[in-house]
Amino acid sequence: MDALDDMASVPTAAGRLPLIGHGLALARRKQDFMCELAAHGELVRLYLGRLPAYYVHGPELLRHLLVTDARKVAKGWVYDRVRALIGDGLVTAEGPLHAMHRRMIQPAFRSTSIASYMDVMHREATEMARSWQAGRAVAVDRAVAGLAGTVVARSLCSSAHMSPRTAGRLAFLNTSVLKVMSARSLLPRSTWERLPLPSTRRTTAHVAEFHRIVDDLIARYRADGTDHGDLLSVLLAARDADTGAALSDRQIHSEITTLFVAGIETTSAALAGAFHELARNPDIEQRVVAELGEVLAGRPPALGDLPRLDYTRRFLREVLRRYGIWFLMRRAVDDLEWRGLRIPAGTTLLFSPYALHHDPGLYPDPARIDPDRWLEDDLPREAFLPFSTGPRGCLGESFAWAELTVVLAAVLSRWRLRPAPGSAVRHVASSSVRPEPLRMIAEPRRPPG
């Protein structure tokens, strides 16, 4: 049986429309549509416009895609479209270029570096918490998005070259970068971005300003010549172990943009999800607060504390499961063979961490936050993919875990957050699924006893 006959045996998802295929369902019902695809089985055909693609589901096939056959797949055309926006950083780079950049940047995420970034995380989270007023409503989703951006900016550049205003501005401008990326991801190529609409011009100006600030920071650090012990200093000092080559200014620019894009979206969605779920589950909140108080005794978390915060970590695993990335793409660059099925080179492959994490066969009652489901973690590794896995697993995973824990401790030591009267929260998918709008009332937390 040849490759085309093999693929013809794969079922096609219902709801295909002329010309646009399943594009309308993807645009309107993102995460729900992915969960519906998962219900069809481990491999399902869908159409992005007229282009056939194949949805991959389940730990076994995802292990083939992300680990076993990782060298036989590339990122896919979604990433081709955003490469012009963020460059060839770790998110979009392919092959040897990706491997080289990963080796060179790895030192920025060693344990000693994460420990120093935690000081930045605590300082910024504490400042955010102190800015809130008792009994006043807080747009928590916006607050944590701004915080995540500021943390990345401050970790990137800890010197005087990064003023508080610049850090805040970069965090704000990054939202425009993310909006453009989202618009380009699945929709057909169009001319809408070139239309002289006020919103289009504003977004274009924001993206250009973001890139100008990054270029200015690189130039200042080059002229300064000082090792400030931050991410930008690591990027400037990085050398390839095989060739001794340094990163060019353009490559450093791409990595900085990648750090903002990758370091804000997932973390801010998880933080918003964490505060939303704690308010909905007061028994879980009580246990998290009690553990933070017992282990930390009022001080900020240190790197060595993270393994001791067992219940808090299990809660955060549930949050990352519940508020995950809704879809990712790959493209086969060589023929693949899965269970006797031949998938030809050039095939577009999609998978959804969100749908995987809501598969009732893996996670009974998946909409329920249950930290204790992780007490006996006997699932395959590829059943939980908040940071993907394999050669393209997120390099900043330790950074994210540290930030989630530090921010949770800083806020919960001071405030109890409750839903604002009349608030109606929806689960919205941009890159990650997040609760929006998240207006909450900050109530002072009384010390126990």
Image (cartoon, rainbow, N blue to C red):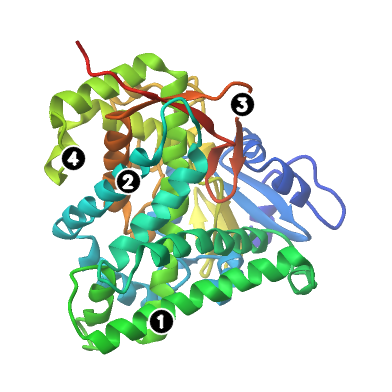
**Which amino acid, mark 4?**
Pro
Going 16% across and 45% down the picture, which residue do you hit?
303
**Which amino acid, mark 1?**
Asp
Quote the CA–CA distance across marks 2 and 1. 27 Å
Quote the CA–CA distance across marks 3 and 2. 26 Å
Q: Nearer the viewer, residue 349 or 240?
A: 240
Query: Hey, which quadrant is residue 197 in on the image?
Result: bottom right
Which numbered dot is residue 426? none
**Which amino acid, mark 3?**
Ser
**Which amino acid, mark 2?**
Glu
The residue to which callout 1 is attached is 216
**In x, y percent, where is residue 28?**
73, 43
Please tell me whether mark 2 sits on a helix, a strand or a loop.
Answer: helix
Which part of the image, by quadrant, shows the C terminus?
A: top left
The residue to which callout 4 is attached is 301
Quote the CA–CA distance across marks 3 and 4. 32 Å
Earlier residue among tags 2 and 4:
2
Earlier residue among tags 3 and 2:
2
Going 30% across and 29% down the picture, which residue do you hit?
414
The residue to which callout 3 is attached is 423
Kindly report which numbered mark, 3 or 4, lies closer to the viewer in this rendering: 3
Which numbered dot is residue 127? 2
